[in-house]
Image (cartoon, rainbow, N blue to C red):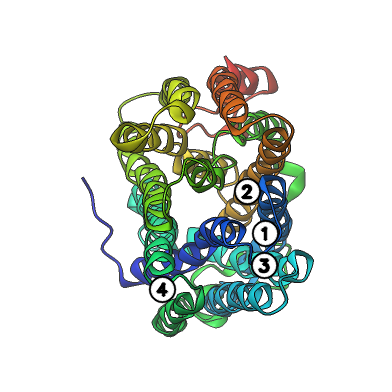
Amino acid sequence: MKFPRKPLFWSVAFGHAVNDTFMSLGAVLLTFMKSRAILPIGTQEIGLAETFRALVGSFSQPFFGWMVEKTGGRWLGAWGVAWTVGFMLLGIALAVATGSFWLMIIPYSLAALGSGAFHPVGALHAAESDKSRANINISWFFLCGQLGLAFGPLVTGFLLQQFNSVVPVFALGLLVIPAVIWMALRIPSKEAYLHAAPEKSASKSAIDFSVLPWKALGLLLLVVTLRGIAQPGSGPFIPVLFEDKGWEPASYGFIASMYWLASGLSGVWFSNLEDRFDRRYIVAASLALCAPAFFFLPYVDGVWAVVLAIIGGGLSGGSHSIIVTAAQELMPGSKAFASGAILGIIFGMGALGSLLIGTVASATSLTFAFGMIGVSALVAAASAFLLPRPHVKVEELSPSEELLEVGD
């Protein structure tokens, strides 16, 4: 197991953990406010809130990625995390003060602009902090984000159960202070960034769209689209499923945390496997094997529920860093834009998946909806063979060779 070594890496990794802590605690908070009648909402509204927020982040990320290519993104990264935390807390405050879902959803959704600004910055500098270990660094960067996704539901569920109030959650906002300071000190200034990469001078176009491998990118988009329902679309409904079973906030916060933590840990493992095996087989096998976990999750309780949540989260989410690395390889001269674009698409497809799951669950049941998630994972597994092979320089291939390498 190879550990990242550069202080720049760890600054954006900690920022990622803080950002995703606040992006993940929303589902637990909404579930709690639903159960305590603080907000008059159901499963469909939870899916709608997660969809709006994820779409704001997904549409903004390619734009922010383009900006990062020109500037290095020091302040986009640091202030992006501060924006995420501030607007999430504002949304919670409005929910408690007004009891209005539609007032709450405005800052709740706008919080994703900060996440959209941070992610291209973090992914760029995680990879570029040590170019000889870029793939491993990316997987560790996303592990830190998944640790945040795990920490958010866990600590939020504990605080909600202990105090039966959302007020203590506001203390978590203090985490943003060291994150902003550390990134502001470590991420290169615009001048230093352009000096190290003069080809990205602001006077030039950061991205030459005419030379992009559009066929390969289109196939990658198809894979991400089919995968979106299973991961990350299913995540917001883990706490809802077990709140309906009568679990307390600390318990459904814990199982949601295990789901996200497994996803992050498996991502590091999968990235190490990618050095030995074709990435297409890794992604296909993991998605096929996670399907039974989603099928059976509504039917179990207790320890078996935690086990299946770990299996479902770990196997469905472990390919996250592999997909981002594939996008960066297809656009080697524009890694920040590639990261922003592919992350935006991943989150956008997850958002649409959440909307679909919430709508289906409201019309039928969560049991049926989780069966649908399992089916989507199987379809996504079949599509994984369309992923580009690792380390293939697509721009050097002829059109027929490109199709063979990408989708044979």
To which residue does mark 3 refer?
108
Closer to the chain start, of discs 1 and 3, is: 1
Left or right: residue 98 compared with residue 308: right
To which residue does mark 4 refer?
163
Residue at image position (33%, 44%) is 268
Going by the numbered disc 2, the residue's amino acid type is: Phe
Residue at image position (71%, 69%) is 104
Say the numbered circle drawn on residue 165.
none
Say the numbered circle drawn on residue 347.
2
Which quarter of the rendered picture does the C terminus lie within? top right
Q: Which of marks 2 and 4 is in front?
A: 4
Going by the numbered disc 3, the residue's amino acid type is: Tyr
Residue 396 % position (x, y): 59, 32
Element type where label 2 sits in the image: helix
Closer to the chain start, of discs 1 and 2, is: 1
Closer to the chain start, of discs 2 and 3, is: 3
Q: Nearer the viewer, mark 2 or mark 3?
A: 3
Q: Nearer the viewer, mark 4 or mark 1?
A: 4
Residue 92 % position (x, y): 61, 73
Closer to the chain start, of discs 4 and 3, is: 3
Which quarter of the rendered picture does the N terminus lie within? top left
Left or right: residue 134 compared with residue 89: left
Left or right: residue 350 compared with residue 316: right
The front one of 390 and 16 is 16
The front one of 69 and 311 is 311
Closer to the chain start, of discs 2 and 4, is: 4
To which residue does mark 1 refer?
57
Alpha-carbon span between mark 1 and mark 3? 11 Å
Element type where label 3 sits in the image: helix
Relative vertical location of residue 375 with respect to residue 329 in this rendering, above or below? above
Residue 16 % position (x, y): 45, 64
